[in-house]
Structures are given as structure tokens and as C-alpha cells.
Amino acid sequence: MSEKIALIEGAQEVMEAARFADTSAVSHRVRFDAALCTGCGLCAAFCPMEVIAVEDGAPVAVAEEACWGCETCSGQCPTHAIRIEAAPGAAEVAAEEPAEPLDEVVREQYRAWADTLTEVLGLRWHPVAVSLIGADEPLPAVPQPEERLRFCQALMAARRGRALMMPVNRHACPDGTSILGLSPIPAKLASGELYILFHKLDSVEAAQRMVAERPSLPPRSVRATVTCPLDDARCEAQVVAVIGTPEQMMWLSMATSYYTGHRHDFHASGYNAQCVETTLIPLTSGEINISFGCYGCRASSDVDDSLMMMGIPVALMDDVVRGLRELGKRAIPQSRDKVYLPPF
Ligand code: SF4
Ligand code: SF4
């Protein structure tokens, strides 16, 4: 067992104790249809927050206040016997003085970056400015969604032009939220148990290794995620996420190497695409990273099968954009015009 896995296991008690402190009010109701329910218990087994228990052969919401509205239970129910009802506004963040608006010089720079990325690559969607607001930082003036969303859903909304801020009580994915430092990791995810139930990994050991090898931020070190179109950012970004085709990613990768010739060591897995691969790896490594998406974001957002993602640390953006402009003068248009066919 690796040291990292032992640390995760050791932290479980603390995380369990903190489970109920993350939601200050009930924001979801879990409804079961007794006429449809067979009492199979799958909902209880799959709920990452241990909201549901089976009592006398029937599921019961024993800890409704801990429900995140992630709909894992209803997604697994073979008879569609579960309905999760959201109660919008039940857990608002207390009103407070918002952070200073983003400096106009920075906004202008972000717009210029967005223009170059969009024009040279021919992006269909906005590049996205991703910001993680630290626990002791003021919140920027950005709208919150009415209902809980997954981080990947917010990122996809931003590529369509919608800026969103999500404190922990607006996040719907306990896994991504713990990775991004908004909450402790639920025990069933840290232990690997859920990944085995989903048939996504061969063994508990493999699941624990996958969890241990991904970066994560300390619980509650982040108070909100903010995802904005890069050309309409409301606060300083740490990472720029680009959603595009493999060909567009190829040019971005080359733009990053344009002045240095360095090749890239990408870190991708198919698990935790937007939170880990597109956001945290660029943030913690200072290097660009690609993602093929994960089964979670592909199921819960409108990301097309033909698309993949790249996360670019903001500190690299100047060089990436300069390199891309140079490639855009001749290399990209010329290459896109050429088709080499075998001689038959
Ligand atoms: S998964 Fe559906 S059918 Fe099975 S116990 Fe839960 S509600 Fe009932
Ligand atoms: S919506 Fe998610 S957290 Fe709530 S009961 Fe269902 S699986 Fe558990």
C-alpha cells in the first residue's frame, strides 16, 4: 500500500465527521415510488454520500441533509423508482461584499487571448477562464446556478457563454468537488468502492491507486469555482480550458513548444477529466495538459464525441498565444490546405 493511500484511509474518520457540515440546509428531497421499487438496494449501494439505507426491504433516505442531488441513485435504479427534487435557494451563500471587479487591463488581455485562440484555431466555442476562489478570498460578483451542477457542466456552460460561480452548495458531484478542494472526499470514493460498483476498475487496489495518483487540493481550501467565457472573465483565472477537436489540440500543443521545441508529457486517464486533467494538473504542474474527457462529463454534459480538452496554466498563455499567432501566419493555413494521398 502506498503512503498516499494510507494517508487517504487515515483521513476517512475526519471526512466522515465533516460530511454533514457541508450542507447548511436541506436542498434536495429523495422520493421513492413504492409501487415501482423492488427493494433491490442498488440506490443505497451507489449513493456516494450514504444518504439511503434499506430498512425492512425498502429504501429510506436516512440522511437527506447530506444529499448532493448528484442523481447517481436514480441513474442506477432499474425501475425508475427514485425522484430527486431540488429545493432552489435552500442553501444560499450569505450576502457579503463582493470582490473588486477584474481589472480592465486584465480583461482586455483575456479578450485578446480569446480572439487569437478562436480565430487561429477556428474554435466553435469560447475558451473558458477557470478560477478557484481560495477559502479566505472574497467571492466575485458572478451569478450562481439555481440548482446544483457538476463542475464539468459549468465548464461546458461557460464555453457557450454563461459565467457561473459555484460554492460547495451549488456543486452536484461529490468526487470533483472534493478533488477541487471544496469538500472532504466521501469514504466510498476514497476507498475505491464506488469505482468497483460502476465496473470502471478491476480491483479496489487499482481504484485506490487511481485516486492516489490524481492531484487534489486540501478539503475546504477552495470556497467556490468560477467558470467564465475567457472573453467575459469576472475574476483572475488560473487555467484556461479549451474544448476542441484533436487537430485544434495538436496546434495548441505545437504553439506551446514553438519557442522551445519541448515535447509534452500529458497526464490523462479517462477518470475525472475536467476537474483533474483539464484544471488541477495544469494548475499544480504549471504545464499544459490534455484530456479525452471522462465517462462522467460525457454522460452529464453536451460535450460531443469528437471533442477533447486542454488546460493551459494562465502563466503560459502569453507564450502559447504568441506561438499560435506565428503558426497561424503560414503553418496552419498551409497544412490545412494540403492533403497527402497515397499514389493510387
Ligand atoms: S434502486 Fe430503485 S428499485 Fe432498487 S431499492 Fe432503490 S428505489 Fe427501489
Ligand atoms: S442524489 Fe446523489 S447524494 Fe442524493 S441520494 Fe441520490 S446518490 Fe445520494
Image (cartoon, helix red, strand yellow):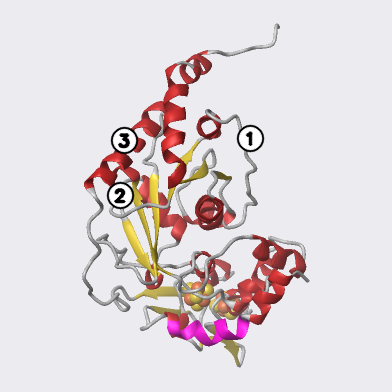
Circle 2 — which element? loop
Q: Residue at x 59, y 61 (%)?
A: 215
Q: Overall secondary structure of the magenta stretch? A: helix
Left or right, 109 with respect to 177, comes to: left
Residue wearing tag 1 = 263
Camera-nearest label, 1 or 2: 1
Magenta residue check for 158: no
The CA span between labels 1 and 2 is 30 Å
Whether the residues at callouts 1 and 2 have beta carbons within 8 Å, the answer is no
Disc sitting over residue 176 in the figure: none
Q: What amino acid type should be assigned to the residue bearing mark 3? A: Ala
Residue 125 versus residue 185: which sits nearer the camera?
Answer: 185
Give the quadrant of the C terminus: top right
Residue wearing tag 2 = 233
Magenta residue check for 20: yes
Instruction: Give the quadrant of residue 96.
Output: bottom left
Above-or-below relation of 79 to 331: below
Q: Which residue is at the far bottom?
A: 56
Q: How many discs appear?
A: 3
Of the image marks 3 and 1, the number of the one nearer the N terminus: 3
Q: What amino acid type should be assigned to the residue bearing mark 2? A: Ala
Q: Which residue is at the far top?
A: 343
Relative image position of residue 58 (x, y in whole percent): 57, 87
Of the image marks 3 and 2, the number of the one nearer the N terminus: 3
Residue wearing tag 3 = 112
Q: Is mark 2 within 8 Å of ligand 2?
A: no
Q: Residue at x 62, y 81 (%)?
A: 12
